[in-house]
Amino acid sequence: MASLGLLLLFPFLMAYAAANDLLTMLIPNRISLALTAAFAAVAAAAGLGLPEIASHVGAGAATLCVTFLMFSLRLIGGGDAKLASATALWMGFDHLVAYALTASALGGLLTLMIIVARAQPVLPASIGRLPFACRLHDDRTGVPYGIALALAALLVLPETSIWSRGLGS
């Protein structure tokens, strides 16, 4: 039962990360830390062995290296790098490519949608009163890529062994 509670925490944290990124263009560190702690608890409750845990940790570490290189090149934000790495911990190497490809496709779609919206000279009055909408419309602002990372995680995680083992299936 504890693992079911923790598996419900993952979708909540992903939604929280996406909402934070949309509204503030920031993903708080506490989200990535909570994802990491929840993984440890689910891994223990699901009975993952040391080699399997090490593989998941390796996927998270590899992702951290790649995403921090991207961050240092100013291609993504630091919160995105940490969120992708904490999520990769849950995916493991078995589903890391599926996660990365899904996040890339969704991120590309999100970016195109924002470019189209930014091409409009003025936001509609009802939307223009929302601070986050004005921020998104500003072409000097980045893209809240955490939305794509979170949605990709929610789409891919149910295919993973940690999900099925955590649910006792």
Image (tube, helix red, strand yellow):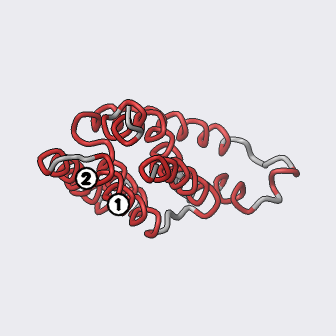
The image quadrant of residue 70 is: bottom left
> Furthest-front residue in view?
1
Badge nearest the viewer, 2 or 1: 1
State the residue at coordinates (46%, 69%).
30
Picture residue at 38% right of the left edge, 37% below the top: 168
Q: Residue at x 75, y 46 (%)?
A: 121
- x, y (%) of residue 31? 46, 63
Determine which residue is flagged by label 1: 36
Q: Which mark is residue 60?
A: 2
Marks 2/1: CA distance? 10 Å
Mark 2: few/some/many CA within 10 Å (<14, 14-19, 20+): many
Give the crowd class for mark 1: few <14, some 14-19, many >=20 residues within 10 Å: many
In which quadrant of the rendered image does the C terminus lie? top left
Q: Secondary structure at mark 2?
A: helix
Quarter of the figure with residue 93: top left
Q: Residue furthest left?
A: 51
Mark 2 is on which residue type? Gly
**Closer to us: 29 or 44:** 44
Tag 1's secondary structure? helix
Q: Can residue 104 be spotted in the picture?
A: no
CB atoms at circles 2 and 1 under 8 Å apart? yes
Q: Nearer the viewer, residue 168 or 111?
A: 168
Mark earlier in primary sequence (2, 1): 1
Q: Residue at x 83, y 59 (%)?
A: 129
Q: Which of the two residues, 133 or 41, is positioned nearer the viewer here?
A: 41
Q: In this image, 42 relative to 21: left or right?
A: left
**Residue 91 shows up from this direction:** yes
Left of 120 or right of it: where is 1?
A: left
Residue 110 is situated, as x and y percent measured from the top left of the image, at: 55, 39
